[in-house]
Amino acid sequence: MELNSGDTAWVLISTALVLLMTPGLALFYGGMTRAKSTLNMMMMSFAAIAIVSVLWVVYGYSLAFGDSGSGFYGAFAWSDLSAGIDSLANNGGEYPIPLLSFAAFQLMFAIITVALISGAIADRAKFLTWGIFAAIWVTVVYFPVAHWVFDFGTADAEGNVTGSGWLADLGVVDFAGGTAVHINAGAAGLALAIVLGRRIGFKKSPIRPHNLPLVLLGSGLLWFGWFGFNAGSALGANGTAALALLNTQVATAAGLAGWLLVERLRDGHATSLGAASGAVAGLVAITPACASLDPWAAVLLGLIAGALCALAVGLKYKLNYDDSLDVVGVHLVGGLVGCLFIGFFATEGGLVFGDGAELLGKQAIGAFSTLAYSFVVTLVLGFILAKTIGFRVSKDAEMEGVDLTQHAESAYELDSVSGGGFVGSAAKAKSPVSVKKDEEVSA
């Protein structure tokens, strides 16, 4: 098979689009936090880019897509990608694109998955511990789960395939990451929210987004980048990519509408935060299903996901866990809805079209096995880090703001004395809490 320049170009463009999603997520999350936590929130996404990129080249690609003979993990070996300059990608069959383009594309999925988790622990996490967690979590959770779902094995010249993941072998349909990315990150976010505990003032005082235009900008960049996420997963410029792209657009639009409809009926008004969150809910739900549905079914999925996620985000107040930026309500719930929806409405194997419940059963196994594995391992890892080096900042540091205490910076310098210049230390950039304390001492 010869290299196809058109397919290669599309995969390379899609790779760049998926990378853009992580800075977009940083803006989305950054706007949703309080002003004193903005930089810390965004830095957790950028740290994910740095940490995961390095580990992917060292051993991550091999652990996710290497052939160990096991359906549960790839090869524990150095990721030798040097041969990728001349070789073609082989994942259940050979593709007319370079191996390096496939490896780079899959790297971006690993990055965004780690970054998504950070939204559950906004305002209260130690940055160093987050970095250590990200390195360990992507190694023991994401890389193996990516092998389960995305590794379709290596095909030889006779068409024999070896080294595929167990969920891929089972026949679970997850075109672009409903299990490995969204359910995985959502379950991990729930576990970390339990480990770190509730923020000071949770359910006692309103904790509102500090910059809604930033949230809308971030969601727009996520929407734009998601075309690479979903349509790029076709690994070629073909009809499957076109179907995935169209379904992504209409499901996202419907998700936005579904969320706003719930807000209008429940609260009497539709919000900009709801619009941004509804769009993301639609994106999450269509991710596993984008190549398996007719466009009308994608619209239905978006409406359902937008409405259900809008209702699900309120569960944290009833169940008393502090998922700061609704990672559980949007990504875990949205991912489950999208994966299970395939069992009903997939054009091939869907229950609605008279093909029985076999596919639905497989989808449930894929979704809930990923959920259970990610939640349990993350819970154990989180508790170990919390009890050893500490995961949550002190009460005083949380009140002061993690931007100042963790990074010695402030997102917005409004002090007329400094003239809006760079703040070099926490001592030079005092928060209202510090100013109040100084006034009390002076008095």
Image (tube, helix red, strand yellow):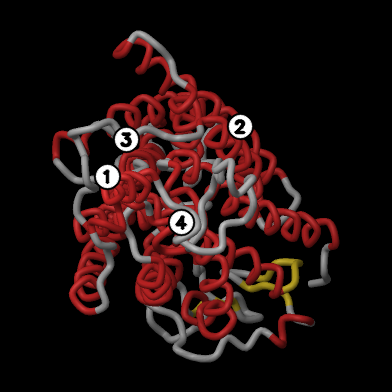
Give the residue number, with chain letter if any, for mark 3. Answer: 207
**Quarter holding residue 273:** top left
Q: N-terminal of the two: label 1 or label 4?
A: 4
The answer to the question of whether label 1 and label 3 lie on touching residues, with beta carbons closer than 8 A, is no
Viewer-side label of 1, 3:
1
Say which amino acid is labelled 1.
Answer: Ala
Q: N-terminal of the two: label 1 or label 3?
A: 3
Q: Is residue 438 above or below residue 248?
A: below
Viewer-side label of 1, 2:
1
Say which amino acid is labelled 3.
Answer: Ile
Q: Which type of secondary structure does the marked residue at label 3 adopt?
A: loop
The answer to the question of whether label 4 and label 3 lie on touching residues, with beta carbons closer than 8 A, is no
Q: CA distance from mark 1 to mark 3?
A: 31 Å
Give the residue number, with chain letter if any, for mark 2. Answer: 249
Q: Nearer the viewer, residue 315 or 27?
A: 27
Outermost residue toward the bottom in this view: 77
Q: Residue at the spot x=35%, y=17% of the render?
A: 262
Horizontal arrangement in the rendering, residue 308 relative to residue 279 (left or right): left
Q: Is residue 116 visible?
A: yes
Which x, y percent locates residue 412? Answer: 55, 44
Q: Residues within 10 Å of mark 4 (few under 14, many from 20)?
A: many
Q: CA distance from mark 2 to mark 3?
A: 31 Å
Q: Which type of secondary structure does the marked residue at label 4 adopt?
A: helix
Identify the mark at residue 40; answer none if there is no mark: 4
Identify the mark at residue 79; answer none if there is no mark: none
Horizontal arrangement in the rendering, residue 60 relative to residue 89 (left or right): left
Horizontal arrangement in the rendering, residue 407 relative to residue 231 (left or right): left
Q: Which type of secondary structure does the marked residue at label 2 adopt?
A: helix
Give the residue number, with chain letter if any, for mark 1. Answer: 443
Give the quarter of the figure containing the N terminus: bottom right
Give the quarter of the figure containing the C terminus: top left
